[in-house]
Amino acid sequence: MRIRPFSFSARALAVLGLAALGATSFAGAGTATAATSGAHHGVKPIHQGIRPMATSSNTLKVGSSATQGVVSPTPKVYLVFWGSQWSSDPAGVAPDMQNMFKGLYGSQDTWGTILSQYCEGVAKGTSNCGTKGTHVVHPTTTPLVGTWFDNAAAAPSNATAAQLAAEAVSAAKHFGNTTQAPNLNAQYVIVSATGTHPDGFPSSGFCAWHDYTASSYGNLAYTNLPYVPDTGVDGCTTLTDGRALSGIESTETHEYAETVTDTWPSIGWNGGGGEIGDECENMDAFVKLSTGSFDLQGLWSNSAAKCVTHG
């Protein structure tokens, strides 16, 4: 699992320290049975240009020969807009996230095809799946299979990692994913509202992070996606287009790809520079999908031996 840090638009701080966050446990609605997987770690430099672009020495390798949890072979995204605070959405994050995922499939989405080279069910240390293993399948329909505005009550103004994990468990229950089988491909994106500060955002120095938690529904992959536009228009992207939504689009495509290729960190695909998105934090591209144009972050391709924005 990797945290994606951000830079303040005002550039008021030259460096932000990224605190290591300890493991947390919870008991959400009587359904959680274990702690979250461990400490969140990994840093993307505040000034993204400082970090050298990944090289062939950063080739991704599979961390476990497990047949489950290494990748999500058929990715399914569940967007969870957490809390009654979503009565306010000044940047239009909720419709934007839905439209972006509604376009991440089919022949027009050549970004998502980068993921198809990665697989599970092969030997630990594998860097080229070839025809072996179970590969990630490029979606032929939208990977967005569920959206939930969980607005019956306010979300915590400063949600802890444990509370975020518990919300993922609540989401699994809401969507009826109450066994391990559907959760082998599911990722629950917990999107916090403007003005809230999940896990110390923004002063902790990250744009977002992903992880997994054990529950009575099996292991659940989830993302902590704060209201990234609160950082300013250039906080989480290398683009300088002035769009309030570019940063959150770049951030969430980073986390989506990492969850697909390292579903239960860190038994999936990692390299010298981290996960598939960590390797390429200096690369963003404004890409046209069937539902609009979006800021998609570049990903590491073993087959190309470099960061790319299309397969």
Image (cartoon, rainbow, N blue to C red):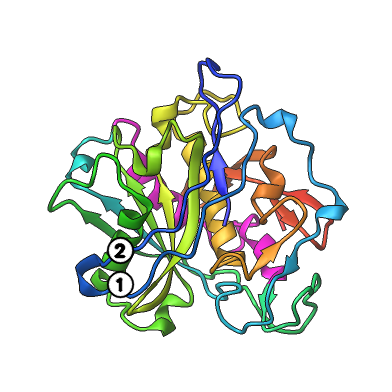
Residue 171 vs 230, above or below: the answer is: below
Badge 1 density bin: few <14, some 14–19, many ≥20, Cα 10 Å? many
Q: Which mark is residue 32?
A: 1
In this rendering, would 73 be left or right of 170?
Answer: right
Q: Is residue 115 magenta?
A: yes
Q: Amino acid at mark 1?
A: Ala
Give the residue drawn at x 30%, y 62%. 166
Check whether the beta carbons of the residues at disc 2 and disc 1 lie within 8 A of each other: yes
Dot 2 falls on a residue whose secondary structure is: loop
What residue did someone put label 2 on?
Answer: 26
Give the residue drawn at x 12%, y 53%. 152
In this rendering, would 280 be left or right of 112?
Answer: right
Give the residue drawn at x 69%, y 71%. 63
Residue 219 vs 60, above or below: the answer is: below
Which quadrant does the C terminus fall into?
Answer: bottom right
Residue 197 location in percent, x, y? 34, 37
